[in-house]
Image (cartoon, helix red, strand yellow):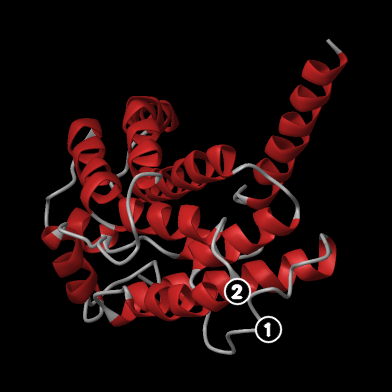
């Protein structure tokens, strides 16, 4: 009984930490990125709840969601020598300039903030072997690993925060009501669980995106005339 209670408390502590790190209030600037969704809304690909859920679902299942989840899960267990290769791969797995900026800027901001406000032994593990830019999922993995948070909590929490940020952008841009925004997040939760589970079975060397419409949206967004978001 005591052992069970201790494990439950540890998991609860890890989830509370993740809720803080992945909340919209955490200073990584997530609110300023739409992941190309702004262009998709302007061109009429996303007009309502159903089309939003379909778009974000595709990004989760066949695009950045699955790629980031796989990188994140792998980073939780790799040794230092392999971490360097993973960091290089994670920094390169971006099909457009804006998507690269979105991930690397958030990754740097995340690590800087965690190091300043949530210090822990091991936060410099990646810095000892890699001095290049750090992709966002890798940054989250390094922080979670340093704080001893289980990957089974980290990966779905990361995906949920990613999806919720896209939904939040759509609520402002379509526009959708706040209630429809929450309906969208609720509808995406089963897919988030499936993608998180799939990521545990994949190798980073074999993962890649196949969400071409989202990639094109990101490219088009670079020259979009009126923009509220950075990507």
Q: Distance from label 1 to label 2 (Cα)?
A: 8 Å
* Quarter of image, res 183: top left
The one of 38 and 86 positioned closer to us in this rendering: 86
Looking at the picture, how far across and down is residue 228, in whole percent? 38, 67
- Which residue is drawn at the image coordinates 78% and 33% (left, top)? 10
Residue at 12% over, 51% down? 44
Q: Name the residue under label 2.
A: 80
Above or below, comparing residue 134 to residue 200 in the picture: below
Label 2: how many residues lie within 10 Å, few (<14), some (14-19) or many (20+)? some
Q: Label 1 neighbourhood size at 10 Å, few (<14), some (14-19), many (20+)? A: few
Mark drawn on residue 194:
none
Q: Residue at the top extreme?
A: 1
What numbered label is drawn on residue 128? 1
**Taking the image as drawn, is residue 26 in sight?**
no
Q: Do the numbered discs 1 and 2 sit on residues whose CB atoms are within 8 Å? A: yes
Q: Residue at x 82, y 20 (%)?
A: 3
In front of the other: 182 or 116? 116
Residue extending furthest right?
2
Element on which disc 2 rests: helix
For the C terminus, which image quadrant? bottom left
Q: Where is residue 165 in the image (x, y as percent from the top left)?
A: 45, 49
Percent from the top left, x then y, of residue 123? 74, 68
Q: In this view, does 4 lie above or below 179?
A: above
């Amino acid at each position: 009984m005591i052992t069970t209670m201790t494990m439950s408390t540890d998991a609860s502590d890890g989830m509370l930490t993740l809720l803080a790190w992945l909340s919209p209030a955490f200073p990584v600037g997530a609110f300023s990125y739409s992941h190309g969704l702004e262009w998709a809304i302007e061109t009429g690909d996303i007009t309502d709840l159903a089309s939003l859920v379909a778009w974000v679902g595709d990004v989760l299942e066949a695009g950045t969601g699955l790629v980031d989840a796989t990188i994140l899960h792998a980073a939780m267990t790799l040794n230092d020598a392999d971490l360097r290769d993973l960091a290089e791969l994670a920094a390169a797995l971006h099909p457009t300039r804006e998507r690269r900026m979105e991930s690397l800027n958030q990754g740097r901001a995340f690590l800087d903030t965690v190091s300043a406000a949530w210090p822990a032994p091991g936060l410099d593990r990646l810095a000892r072997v890699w001095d290049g830019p750090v992709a966002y999922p890798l940054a989250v993995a390094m922080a979670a690993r340093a704080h001893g948070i289980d990957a089974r909590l980290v990966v779905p929490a990361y995906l949920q925060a990613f999806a919720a940020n896209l939904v939040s952008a759509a609520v402002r841009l379509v526009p959708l009501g706040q209630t429809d925004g929450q309906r969208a997040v609720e509808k995406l939760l089963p897919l988030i669980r499936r993608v998180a589970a799939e990521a545990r079975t994949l190798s980073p060397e074999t993962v890649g995106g196949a969400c071409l419409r989202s990639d094109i949206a990101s490219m088009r967004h670079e020259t979009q005339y009126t923009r509220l978001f950075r990507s």
